[in-house]
Image (cartoon, helix red, strand yellow):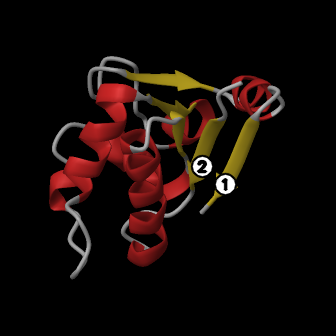
Amino acid sequence: MARTLIVKVTAGADAPERCAQAFTVAATAVAAGADVSLWLTGESSWFALPGRAETFDLPHSAPLADLLAAVLAAGRVTLCTQCAARRSIGSDDVLPGVRIAGAAAFVEEVLTDGAQALVY
């Protein structure tokens, strides 16, 4: 049975190292052939919007836009429903391939047999 990796990132530009770690782990897992689901919550919610990942800069880290593109190409990216609502982000605002879903969908993913969840 293939394992699924769910990465929930709560940090954005407010905690750049933690944010970059989450995106790096998710993209690395995609490159390794894992089934990856990246959840954008809290301040990382802004990266669901076009152009926002390109503004993130952290020395000695891969570009966040490239990491996000890798996950979008071969995995799943979800923006938290409540986090989106608090920031007035709608489904028409997000990057192609990003879905908006809530806690029930997250719980369903993490309780699936063979799933591993990491929270940053």
Can residue 47 be seen from the camera position used here?
A: yes
Apparent side of residue 35 relative to residue 104 in the rendered image (left or right):
left
Can the viewer see residue 94 in this picture?
no
Question: Is the Cβ of the residue at disc 2 closer than 8 Å to that at disc 1?
Answer: yes
Who's the residue at 34% across and 20% down the image?
A: 97
Task: Indicate the secondary structure of the residue bearing disc 1.
Answer: strand
The mark found on residue 22 in the picture is none
Q: Residue at x 39, y 59 (%)?
A: 24
Helix, strand or loop under label 2:
strand
Residue furthest out toward the bottom = 59
Residue located beneath label 1 in the image: 118
Q: Quadrant of the C terminus?
A: bottom right
Residue sitting at x 62%, y 36%: 82
Q: Whole-Å distance between the Cαs marked 2 and 1?
A: 6 Å
Q: Nearer the viewer, residue 119 or 102?
A: 119
Circle nearer the N terminus (2, 1): 2
In this rendering, the answer to whether 14 lies above or below 62 is below
Measured along the vertical axis of the image, is residue 63 above or below residue 97?
below
